[in-house]
Image: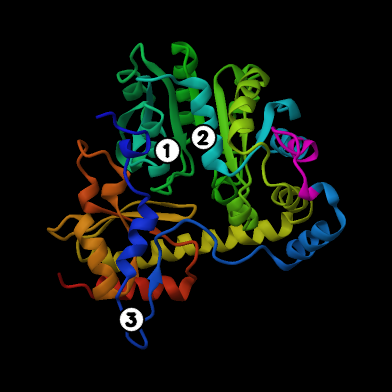
Amino acid sequence: MTQTRTASTFAPPVMEARRWLEGVEHPNGRPLINVSQAAPVDPPPAPLREAMAQMVMEDAEAHLYGPVLGLPALRAEVARQWTASYGGLVGPEQVAITSGCNQAFAAAIATLCAEADEVIIPVPYYFNHRMWLDMSGVRTVALETGDGMVPSAERAAECITERTRAIALVSPNNPCGVEYPEETLQAFLNLAREKGIALIVDETYRDFDSRSAPPHALFADPDWDDTLIQLYSFSKAYRLTGHRVGAVVASEARLAEIEKFLDTVAICPNQLGQRAALWGMQNLGGWLAGERAEILDRRAAIEEQFPRLAAKGWELLGCGAYFAYVRHPFSMSSAELAPRLVKEAGILLLPGTIFMPDDVRGGESQLRIAFANIDRAGIVALFDRLAALTL
């Protein structure tokens, strides 16, 4: 019997984790701490919502089909800001707007891969990337990371075969939070160019990178678009998760192929969301800087609190952007531990096993904490509960 595309992969992990909540009652004084999903739970800031309300009432074009590759003004604004922030030249014709960053990845893979091709991804990986590769008939080649959860281009070179079509990186990383050093990203670009494959760099969390300087100089290479495909999401920066707005930055020729994919899947990105993203880029720079400062403070709180767990055998493997990635000290697998934490500690988080293929060890001792939606007080409460565990 032929296996269907969707049957070739696993169930959505975040939805699976939410089922652990069914039938569980949380005692008074111990509400659920949900650190399972990397998404803002608050709506866009009030000025943006007000602008969106005006768009709904006054901009008739916001309710109609638009260009497949996105709103021209938004493409131009991305190109302008990317050129300024990365120190290289990006043109509007090298930017496409997508229905979220997941669709940007799917579209890029559709232009790169055929059945039984291969894509190299560092592990732990972002599970939706693995799911899309599975459903595309593409083999995921796991690249194990070294110290600090940072992948090695030298090690990746050993994984390249005649079927390799791309290497896909996420920085700042999901699930580990790690910010890949500039020299690491440059080494991967050099390797991909030498081997004639694509380098996909997902920078969904670029707005929360702790570095004041540009995180890399890949766009400063005048020929960057012969190899590099960058992905981005407006969801995290402007709290537009429900409006599904992302971007892919690549060569004009690549975007011509991507247009075929986008036209058959969504026809055009969400028109209101695109206009909201444009308004945010043009008007919310100061507000976004404040959001970044808050996330960096929460990261600092994680690092300040962690010695309490370290004394009990826990290890902080990575921390940054929205995530802390940890190793727990218990004898049970994280796949068993995570559901128990819901019942016994009122904590919902994801086990490391969902970020790893079955044939790579390590995930059974790892957990991901998505801390973007808990403040300093919430972080202290989280560590109180974890430190008190006796399993």
Task: In the displayed orientation, state which residue is furthest to the left.
Answer: 331
**Picture disc at residue 105:** 2
Q: Amino acid at mark 3?
A: His
Q: Kindly indicate whether the residue at mark 3 contacts the one at mark 1 (C-beta within 8 angstroms).
A: no
Q: Is the C-beta separation of discs 2 and 3 under 8 Å?
A: no
Task: Give how far apart the Cα atoms at labels 1 and 3 are.
Answer: 33 Å
Left or right relative to 200: residue 66: right
Q: Are marks 2 and 1 in contact (CB under 8 Å)?
A: yes
Where residue 106 appears, as percent x and y from the top left, is 50, 33
Please identify the quadrant where the C terminus is shown: bottom left
Image vertical order of residue 227 relative to residue 80, above or below:
above
Q: Nearer the viewer, residue 360 or 326?
A: 360
Circle on res. 208: none
- Residue at left offset 49%, top offset 21%: 112
Task: Measure the alpha-carbon separation of dots 2 and 1.
Answer: 7 Å
Q: Amino acid at mark 1?
A: His
Is 133 rendered above or below residue 286?
A: above
Query: Quick one: which residue is furthest to the right in this view?
Result: 58
Q: Which SS class for mark 2? A: helix
Q: Residue at x 16, y 73 (%)?
A: 390
- Residue 289: percent from left, percent from top: 66, 57
Q: Which residues are magenta?
A: 62-75
Residue 280 appears in view: yes
Write down the residue under mark 1: 129
Instruction: Give residue 26's mark.
Output: 3
